[in-house]
Amino acid sequence: MKEILITTTCFLLLLKFVPAQNTKLASTPPMGWMSWNFFADKINEKDLKEMAGAMVSSGMAKAGYNYIFIDDGWQGGRDHKNNMLADPVKFPSGIKALAKYMHDRGLKLGIYSDAAQLTCAGYTASLGFEEQDAKTFASWDIDYLKYDYCHAPVDVETAKLRYKKMADALRNSGREIVFGICEWGPRKPWLWAAAVGGQLWRTTYDIRDKWKNLSANENAEGILDILDINAALHEYAGIGKWNDADMLVTGLYGKKGPSGDLGGTGCTDTEYQTQFSLWAMMNAPLYATNDLRNMNEATKSILLNKEVIALNQDALGKQAIRKINNDTWNVFIKPLANGDFAIAILNRSESAKDCNLSFTELGLMDKYEIRDLWLHKFIGKGNKWKGTVQVHETKLFRLKKI
């Protein structure tokens, strides 16, 4: 017990002398495309360039998606001076050249490492080389670091110290680099991640391409499981400090790979639309993971819905609060910077349900003009909404006081 108290006290004393978290970095939740769900560690610069081209040509970049994230598998070991190297076969031009390619197209480049000796997929990681690796990333003009926690001790204090060490290294690297803490939630990073220098933190294990987990394996979470965890953490989120509910599975349709493991057999377009709606309401980062080069119209209509994206990127930075939570209904409310409110109504059940919602149940006492953000039209005026919500559908409304 004495050792625990001493360790905790030392950590708190260290935090007294830590510069304030940089909330200018990631002042809105990051948006982009991440490589893991589609490619796993079989990534290369050709595919990433193609994804960047598709991000621009599809209109996603214009809609706000501006990051291409290289996940695990890019590493090629270290040189004789212990500098991190990219795999020369996968990235023959090097990471710095790839960053320039992205920047020339108005995009940003994110990269991946781990707070241990090896990454989750068994590649070279950054423990013991934090300052050196941070300077390397800065010299490559990297814009974001996703920092994982595989092969690391289970206690909380070690996690705090390891993440703080990399955050300090990034802060001293000479370049502003967003720091994404990928701890997956067991050590409750929402309680400490901002204090050690993170701009966002994963709150759950990896998402699988499915509606919900039907097994006893906590690492087999679907959309609904992650929603239930992340929805309870609204008080910890704000500008420059976001609850990361993991990647979007929109458009994967059960693709084999990481998202297809552990029962990830795919979702309906309605369920994909629900994920997008609720991730936007919760100010979660919006990381697409599907093949941007080959999207059907349903996937495009979800990922390119600018009215929904506007909720996620709203300047007020308030995560939605779940006001109604039962086996059938979840109702969320989110205040917006211009005085409007967003409301999300989720039917969790296995059949279509009729809903008769008075906005007074959410604490909204005025009358409002109601806009449906998926139909892209105004549907009425007043202080209530009545209608049918399909299985696993989310109705998403923007309310303007009249």
Image (cartoon, rainbow, N blue to C red):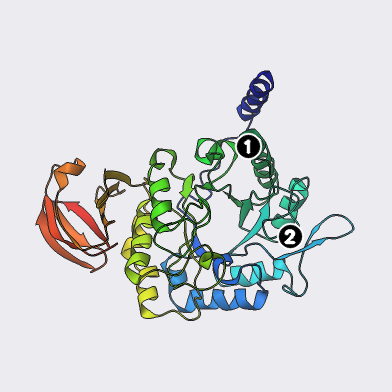
What residue sits 67% from the left and 74% below the top?
44
Q: Is residue 333 visible?
A: yes
Q: Choose between 222 and 92: the one closer to the eye.
A: 222
Regarding mark 1 in the picture, which secondary structure is present there?
Answer: helix
Name the residue tied to disc 2. Answer: 123
Indicate left or right for 360 with 139 as reference: left
Q: Nearer the viewer, residue 323 or 48?
A: 323
Where residue 49 sits in the image (x, y, percent)? 61, 76
| Quarter of the figure with the N terminus | top right
Tell which residue pokes out farthest to the front in this image.
Answer: 216
Q: CA distance from mark 1 to mark 2?
A: 22 Å
- Across and down, in percent, residue 18 comes to 63, 32
The residue positioned 63% from the left and 51% from the top of the image is 147
Label 2, secondary structure: give it. loop
Residue 107 appearing in the image: no
- Give the labeled residue for mark 1: 160
The numbered mark at residue 135 is: none
The kind of residue on which mark 1 rests is Lys
In which image quadrant can residue 92 be found?
A: bottom right
Residue drawn at the location 23% of the way across and 58% of the way down: 397
Residue 234 lies left or right of residue 172; in this view the side is left
